[in-house]
Amino acid sequence: MRSWGPDKRRWSASGGVALCALMGLCACGGDSGGGDGVSGPSSESVPVVRPEAVTEVASQGVELGLPDGDWGSNALSVVQDALLGTWVGGPEGLFVERSAGFELVDAEPVNAMILLEEVGVLVARADGLWVWDGASLRITSLQSELGEGPVLALAEADGVLWLATDAELFVYEGGQLAAFEGIEAVVGIHAAADASQVVLTQDDGALSLLRQDGDGWVWVSLEQEPASAAVPAANGRLLGLDGDALIERVSLGDGQVAWRPVALTDSPDDPGAAGLEALASDPQSGAVWAVDSGHIAKLSGASVERFEKPEALGTVSLAQVSQDGILWLWADGALWRVGDDGEVVGFATHIEPFAQANCGRCHAEGGVAHHLETYEQWSDEAAAILVTLEEGSMPADGQPLELGTAQLVQRWIEDGLEP
Ligand code: HEC
């Protein structure tokens, strides 16, 4: 893993090329806030946005036990990666999933957390911005570039990183850090998968939108519009909630926009989905998940996949999609993982590189210990290997693990010891 921070990359503090391009920020743009003629979904003849295909899928949700505590649902972040494992951060600290459940790594409250490819997990706390690379937490020097105050929200899409402190919103892209002056108190950032738009939630609940426009960004306040929550979807779409109804912001041309009801079934009489509890967007694919009292639906483009909500799953107060496309639901004090049919851990793809990096110096030809190199050796000893990794007795020289943790071996076992 590369180390990450100003010492390895060139950063420019608020200023420079990227910022100049942002100067037009609040001033103008075809899609500006107040001037929009927004027509709500009240008119009777409002066309409903309908899916072209609806499939019913069977998918299981799994309830995960989190330690008791004050898990404020809005401050919960989940990160999952085949190599790094599953991490949950929130007011109770940073936790990792082990075979026996979630285990506390560090009790310092986590404001926000995100997985950055080839870097690790970026963890925002009151005492700075940290990187967790699977073995240790390291402070980054990025915090000092952001000025006073801790980072409260994070998002990443297509190589563009968003960070918000109480005072300012920042974007980091292509080696440039730029600040958006005048956008304060952002506590939630949802970035579209293609990085073309970002939905911001401020601490008073106000929603706004940043849309890419040429080299800069145009800021659009959604305060006069009906959506009480909104998430970006693929192809520049924006879906939202009007109370518990699913709506989509549609451009009518000439700067006019309207919010239209969105149906999740293929019935021509469907007036649009209602009774929604939560909405989340997939930061990789741009798919949007919508949860109501009986169903969980995934909208990808014009098609919808729908499955029944597990009976034990209560009322959902927060939905989040990790970068591997898995949906996480916070419901009645429990965390659920839904649709985890993600990447299977295999020996050739994951375990062999892990073994070479961490065990080969002793458990291979010329080493001091018995051979642990082939699929047969690893699968015969899988259970004993997992125990040594969980105890931390291996690697015997105490060097930090690379390319994975005990969780990788655990998933390999659970996935059926794939070759
Ligand atoms: C610095 C040397 C060293 C490294 C690195 C190392 N081991 Fe070992 N390991 C040993 C020695 C020495 C023994 C005891 C002799 C033996 O069992 O061959 C041992 C024994 C074991 C055993 C059997 C012990 C038991 O309690 O059943 C397992 C399983 C094991 N190692 C797994 C691993 C794995 C997996 C890695 C890599 C993640 C690893 N070791 C890395 C030196 C090392």
Image (cartoon, helix red, strand yellow):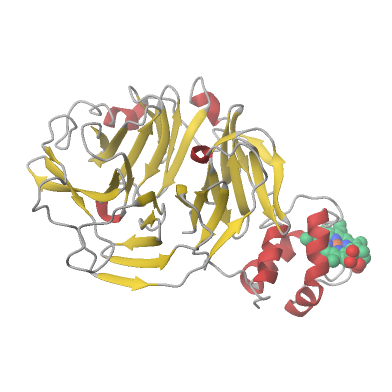
Q: Which quarter of the figure has residue 350?
A: bottom right
Q: Which quarter of the figure has residue 17?
A: top left
Using the image, determine if residue 51 lies above or below residue 115. below
Q: Is residue 344 left or right of residue 361?
A: left
Residue drawn at 13 percent across, 35 percent down: 36
Residue drawn at 82 percent across, 62 percent down: 387
Using the image, determine if residue 118 lies above or below residue 378. above
- Relative image position of residue 50 (x, y in whole percent): 21, 62
User: Does the image show residue 218?
Assistant: yes
Q: In this view of the protein, which residue sits in the foreground, 53 or 384?
A: 53
Quick check: which quadrant has ligand 1?
Answer: bottom right
Q: Is residue 2 left or right of residue 275?
A: right
Residue drawn at 29 percent across, 37 percent down: 210
In the image as oriented, which residue stretches furthest toward the top? 148
- Relative image position of residue 141 (x, y in whole percent): 58, 30
In the image as oriented, which residue stretches furthest toward the right? 368
- Relative image position of residue 414 (x, y in whole percent): 67, 70
Residue drawn at 48 percent across, 25 percent down: 146
User: Does the image show residue 1?
Assistant: no
Q: Is residue 323 left or right of residue 270?
A: right
- Relative image position of residue 122 (x, y in whole percent): 56, 41
